[in-house]
Image (cartoon, grey):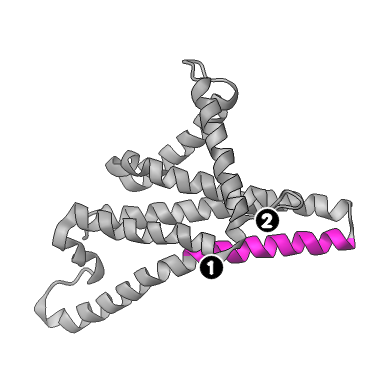
Amino acid sequence: MAFSWVATIIIIIVAILARKSLNLVPSGVQNFVEVIIEFFLDLVETNIGHLGRHFLPFIGTIGIYVLVCNFLGLIPGCEAPTSNLNTNAALALPVFFATHIYGIKEHGLGYIKHFVGPIRSLPALPLMILMFIIEVIGHLARPLTLSVRLFGNMVAKHKIILILLLLSPVVVPTAILGLGVLVSVIQAFVFVLLTTLYLAGSVEAAH
């Protein structure tokens, strides 16, 4: 919990510094922040389309928070908040609810078409019911998979670095630390990408 607040404070400080240094020609902190925001903007517009900018604050906030939390685990004496399953569940549940809230908001009762497959004829009713059950189970599993995937990778990374640090205090941990940075970035990207795809699937037209 303490390191979650540390991650939040770091993000707020960087945001304040970026806001104070706003210029037409970006430099320093503003340039760094703009690169990150442009990455998220391109991601949401590519996958979601015309509604991408609407989801940018939500997706960008989750992505930046997960990334900072992952990086905290690389600092000696610190623990990544994302290595705690409770933190990941607290991130995954808003994604789950947002997916269906915006799906209903965009399509109304027609949102149910996302769960019954492409077949709409009466003779195919048993198949539609089966598809509905499968889709519901799949959607209910999303928060679990988002949470456990991030949790497992962060815990494994932390344990490996700790074990190798005991075996070889200098050489091996340095290489693993570089791998840890890569894992932290990739896991944050995977979490954000899945969030984006879930939202894109909920607001797109069912075919």
Main secondary-structure element of the magenta-colored stretch: helix
Residue at the (51%, 61%) spot, across then down: 88
Q: Residue at x 84, y 55 (%)?
A: 172
Image quarter where the C terminus lies is bottom left
Q: Which residue is mark 2?
A: 79
Q: Which residue is mark 1?
A: 148
Q: Is residue 75 left or right of residue 102?
A: right
Q: Residue at x 71, y 50 (%)?
A: 74
**Is residue 158 rendered magenta in the image?**
yes
List x then y, in percent, for residue 26. 52, 20
User: In the rendered structure, does residue 76 fall within the stretch colored magenta?
Assistant: no
Rendered residue at 65%/48% (across/down): 71
Near-viewer residue (25 or 101): 101
Q: Quadrant of residue 11?
A: top right
Secondary structure beneath dot 1 equals helix
The answer to whether residue 99 is above or below residue 10 is: below
